[in-house]
Amino acid sequence: MLDRRLLRNILLATLGLIALGTATFMSTAGLSFSESLYETVLILLSHFDHYGFKDPQSRWMVIFLVLSSFVVVAYLLKVLADYIVSLGDGLRRKHMKRITAKIHDHYIICGLGRVGSQVADELADDGVPFVCVDKDEDRVKAMIAKGYTAIVGDTTKEEVLKSCGIERAKGIVASLGSDSANLFIVLASRQLNPYIFIVARVNRDENRERMLRAGADRTTMPYQIGAYHMATTLTRPNVVDFLEILATNNNSDLAVHQIKIDERSDLAGKQLSHLYKNKPGATILAMNSADGLSKVNPSGHEVVYAGDTLIVLGNKEQLAEVSGLI
């Protein structure tokens, strides 16, 4: 939207210059009102003295009018540039709103600081749909420049969460810098969507339990994770290198996926060895049962039930084959 106040100031400045130039030329050069007005307007538009004033006062006025006109034009160009930029931003925001109105089974990232922006990059690498939200317009523009879906908004407000399609979302990440703000996001998200998977950032260890009681499924402490990573890199660097290969897929097509068993699966109610007989090539790292128990490196004698989750290691083809068999 055009800045009407700035436009009004530019108009008043222009009229003031015209009045000043007209009055000066009438008194110093002895021109009539119409001639003085004509010469003043012509100097402001062309930045040139067509009349050829001889007296010093008139020449100083010509210089003043020329310099002043440059300032007025610069401000006018600024107004037009801001309007064009805001018009483009408005179109992008409308486009983002249309996308968020249709998106479903997506993830929502609340906060685009160092943690939230990294989460967005990881989700983009995984190729899953997600929406980024932050109050800082520059951060949102940076995400849009990467091709991500991002909107400006305060995620501690329910209407902003609704505009992100939280009722249709699969998961949400509360990654704001304040534990109290993340706690509100957890409470509001659980109320708006009882089935959504919530991951909350926690900055203080004593707030972890509060976040879980509020409805978060998982909590993370970035500083604790960073410290653990550094200590592990120091003592077991080769293990960390292998895990980073799995996490980033750099120079490797290996990946770790989780596959949930539903009631329609051919594997439901059978031993895990039934899957091994088909030799999919992938490795079953662990089996997480629906009741919360986890079996690392299962032997194959375990019975798989609906609701269990398999943690599988393999390349893309192997993982796709396992998914097809299950």
Image (cartoon, rainbow, N blue to C red):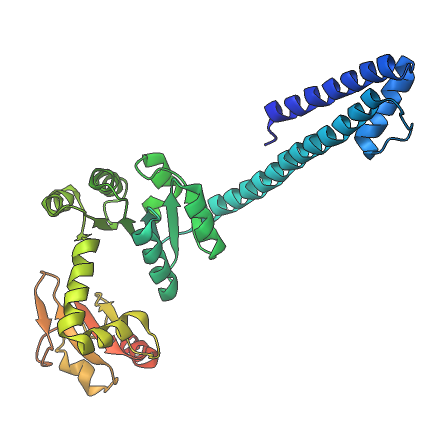
Would you identify the image quadrant in which residue 259 lies? bottom left
Which residue shows up at 32% across the image and 76% down it? Answer: 320
Expressed as whole percent of the image width and height from the top left, the position of residue 246 reads 27, 74
Expressed as whole percent of the image width and height from the top left, the position of residue 32 reads 92, 13
Q: Is residue 102 visible?
A: no
- Image side of residue 318 versus residue 38, left or right: left
Please tell me whether residue 235 is drawn above or below residue 175 in the rendered image: below
Q: Quadrant of the C terminus?
A: bottom left
Expressed as whole percent of the image width and height from the top left, the position of residue 220 reads 19, 53
Would you identify the image quadrant in which residue 223 lies? bottom left
Please tell me whether residue 163 is drawn above or below residue 16 in the rendered image: below
Please tell me whether residue 269 is drawn above or below residue 156 in the rendered image: below
Which residue shows up at 79% across the image and 29% down it? Answer: 44
Expressed as whole percent of the image width and height from the top left, the position of residue 58 reads 83, 22
Q: Decide which of 219, 262 is in the foreground and name it.
A: 219
Q: Quadrant of the N terminus?
A: top right
Q: How many marks?
A: 0
Q: Residue furthest front?
A: 56
Q: Is residue 56 visible?
A: yes
Which residue shows up at 39% across the image and 50% down it? Answer: 131
- Image side of residue 180 versus residue 130, left or right: left
Would you identify the image quadrant in which residue 251 lies? bottom left
Q: Decide which of 300, 29 is in the foreground and name it.
A: 29
Q: Decide which of 286, 134 is in the foreground and name it.
A: 134
Q: Decide which of 166, 110 is in the foreground and name it.
A: 110
